[in-house]
Amino acid sequence: MAKVIGHWINGQEVGLDAKETKPIFNPATGEETAQVAMATLNDVDLATQAAEKAFSQWRNTSIAKRTQIIFKFRELLEAKKPELAKIITSEHGKVLSDALGEITRGQEVVEFASGVGHLLKGFHTENASSEVDVYSIRQPLGVVAGITPFNFPAMVPMWFFPVAIAAGNCFILKPSEKDPSSAMWLARLWQEAGLPDGVFNVVNGDKVAVDGILEHKKIKSVSFVGSTDIAKYVYENGTKNGKRVQALGGAKNHMLVLPDADLDLTADAAVNAGFGSAGERCMAISVIVAVEPVADELISRIKSRMGAIKVGDGTKACDMGPLVTKEHRNKVAGYVDAGEAAGAKLVVDGRAVNPDGAPGGYWLGPTLFDEVSSNMSIYTDEIFGPVLSVVRVKTYEEGIKLINDHPYGNGTAIFTNDGGAARRFQNEIEVGMVGINVPIPVPVAYYSFGGWKSSLFGDHHAHGVEGINFFTRGKVVTQRWLDPSHGGINLGFPQNN
C-alpha cells in the first residue's frame, strides 16, 4: 500500500486517514510513489485555529529570539540541503544540481529574514509639536497563508514564509499536490530549529483547500504563485473576503538580441534559460526576438548546443529531466503540434528525444521553432515546457513594441554590447524584471520579485522590503506626557505649535 502524506498542523502530521487522496508520481519513471491527503474545510480550519492560538505568543516573542530561530533554520537547511534536493528531484523531476540551486536561492530569503530587526524599525520624531513626539511601528497581520506551485516546491514557499514568520505572523502553506513532500520536510526542519508549534503549518489539497483559505475569516493575507487564470481567481476571491493578496501569475519572457551581441554568450544564455528545469520556470526565456541580420547565425549556434543536452533521470549525470506529469508532458507536446500546424519552422523536435531514463518517464526534449509569428499559440501562451521560439524583427523599435504589446510582463532580457541601447531598453520596456546580458533576472533576496501587467495581481511583490510591508501593518503613535499646564477644556482642532 502506498505511503500517505498528510498535513502538518500544530507540530505534527495529521490526516493520514483522509477519505480523499491523490497519487504522487516519480516523473522519471511514471511510477506511483505515494498518496497525498486532500484537505477538507475542517482541516483548513484546524490549521487556522492552531496558527491563531500560536500567534498571541509568537507576535510577542522578541525579535532577538525570532532571529535566533530563523538563523538556526538556515544552518539546518545548509547542512541538509542535499537531502531536500533528492526529494525535489524524486517528485518534480529536475536534475539534482537544479534542485540544489533552487534551495540555495530560497535560502537567500531566509538569510534576508534574519535581518528582520533592521527591517522592522520605525521612525521617531521628537517634539513634532510642543512636547509631542510622533513615531511609527510595524506590526504583524496574524495568520497568513501561501499557495505555491509545483515547479519550485522549496524556493517559492521560501519567498514568503521566512519573511512572514520573522515579522511575527503564523503561516499556513498549501503546496502543490504534485510534489508536497518538500513542504512537509521544511515543516519538520522548522520544528528542529525550535519554532513553536502552530507557527508554521502545511495543508495539502486541491481547490477545496484553496477556497477554504480564501474564504476563512481568520486568515489575513494570501500569497500565490501560479498561472494567470488562477492568480486572478485568488486575487478576486481573496480581496472579496477582506484579505491582502499578492498573486504572481504567468509569463512569456522575451530575450531581445541586437546585432552587436556576442552570439556565443547569447546562445549559451538562451539554451540555459530556455531549457533549464525542462522550461518549467516562470522566468524561463521562451521567446528570442532576433533583430536582423543575427537570426540565422544565432539559431545555428543554439541548435549545435541543443544537440549536446542530455535528457534523462535527474538522479543521473543528465542536463535536463522529465516534465512533472504525464498530462503536462502531453499538453506541451500538443503545443509543438500546434506550432507545426500554424506554419512555424520546427528546427529541433523534442518529441523524438531518446532519454537516459525509464520508458515510462514523462520525457520531452528541448524544442526549437523559427519563423514564429505573434498570432501563433506557441507565442501567445505560456507553454511551461522546453519550447523555445524565435521571432525575427527588423529593428530595435519593432522588438520593443512586440514585447510591450504582450499581455504578460514578468521578465525580459536584452543581449547587446551597446550601453546606450541597454539603458534605453531598461527605461522603455514594460516588464517588471529586466536583465541586461542576464537571461534570468531573478533579483537577489533583498530586492523584490514580481512582474507587471497580467503577471501580477496586487500591489506588493515577493520578499525584499515589499515582502516586509506586505506581512505587516503600519501604525503611527502620537504621544505627549501630560503635566498640569496642559489642563482645561479646548474644543478647537488641535494645532502644531
Image: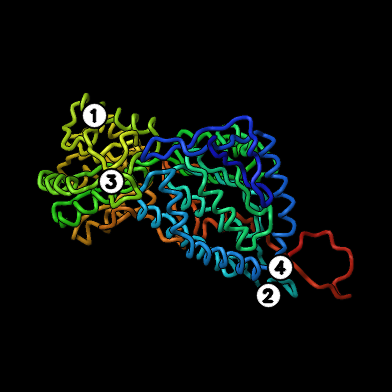
Residue receiving disc 4: 496
Q: What residue type is labelled 4?
A: Asn
Mark 4 to mark 3 CA distance (whole Å): 60 Å
Answer above or below: position of 201 versus 328: below
Residue annotated with mark 1? 339
Residue wearing tag 3: 274
> Helix, strand, or loop for circle 4?
loop
Q: Distance between the residues labelled 4 and 2?
A: 13 Å
Q: Callout 3: few (<14), some (14-19), or many (20+) C-alpha neighbours within 10 Å?
A: many
**Camera sees residue 19:** yes
Q: Which residue is drawn at 20% across and 36% down?
A: 369
Q: Which amino acid does label 1 sit on?
A: Gly
Viewer-nearest of labels 1 and 2?
A: 1
Q: In this view, does 476 lie to the left or right of 340?
A: right
| Tag shown at residue 126 | 2
The C terminus, quarter of image:
bottom right
Residue nearer the viewer, 130 or 84: 84
Which is more N-terminal, label 3 or label 4?
3
Badge 2 crowding class, 10 Å Cα cut-off, few under 14, some 14 to 19, many 20 or more, is few
**Where residue 73 appears, x then y in whole percent?**
56, 63
The image quarter in which residue 367 lies: top left
